[in-house]
Amino acid sequence: MDPVRTCVGCRARASRSSLLRVVARDGALIADRGASLPGRGAWVHDTDECVDAALRRRAFGRALRVSGPLDTQDFHIDHQRKG
């Protein structure tokens, strides 16, 4: 049975394998496609709608417990590549 996580964009629960893990490194968001980077992670559906909702609501900062602002510009571009 696959573990269940909550998408920070739409707040729906989904299996871990259907979500993208995101971590913060040096104040920037990084897509952790292998779900293997160390540290706290946030989970989001790999869709423009959920990523945009999470960015708009500043949900990544809260989920990752980051006190300062996060650089989200490169993450948004990287997310759209889906590579």
Image: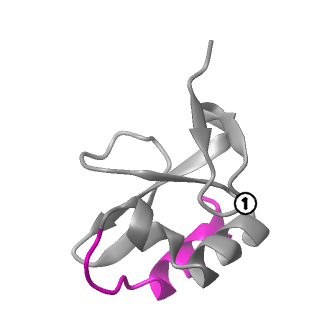
Front residue (pair 26, 33): 26
Inspect this view and state whether residue 37 appears. yes
Picture quadrant of residue 53: bottom right
Picture quadrant of residue 76: bottom right
Question: Relative to 36, is 82 on the left or the right?
Answer: right
Identify the residue at the far top of this view: 1
Tell me where residue 22 appears, x and y as whole percent. Answer: 45, 57
Question: Relative to 39, is 57 on the left or the right?
Answer: right
Front residue (pair 24, 68): 68
Query: Residue at point 33% right, 87% down?
Result: 69
Disc count in the image? 1
For mark 1, does the 10 Å Cα neighbourhood hold few (<14), some (14 to 19), or many (20 or more) residues? some
Q: Which residue is mark 1?
A: 10
Question: Does residue 75 show up magenta in the picture?
Answer: yes
**Residue 4 position (above or below residue 55):** above
Question: Relative to 33, is 7 on the left or the right?
Answer: right
Describe the colour scheme in one phrase. one colour
Helix, strand or loop under label 1 = loop
- Please, what is the three-letter code of the amino acid marked with disc 1? Cys
Q: Quadrant of the N terminus?
A: top right
Tell me where residue 49 appears, x and y as whole percent. Answer: 78, 70
Query: Residue at point 61% right, 45% down?
Result: 6
Query: Residue at point 27% right, 84% down?
Result: 68
Q: Identify the magenta region.
A: 66-83
Query: Residue at point 68% right, 77% down?
Result: 52
Tell me where residue 31 appears, x and y as whole percent. Answer: 47, 60
Q: Quadrant of the C terminus?
A: bottom right
Question: Does residue 2 show up magenta in the picture?
Answer: no
Tell me where residue 36 appears, x and y as whole percent. Answer: 35, 39
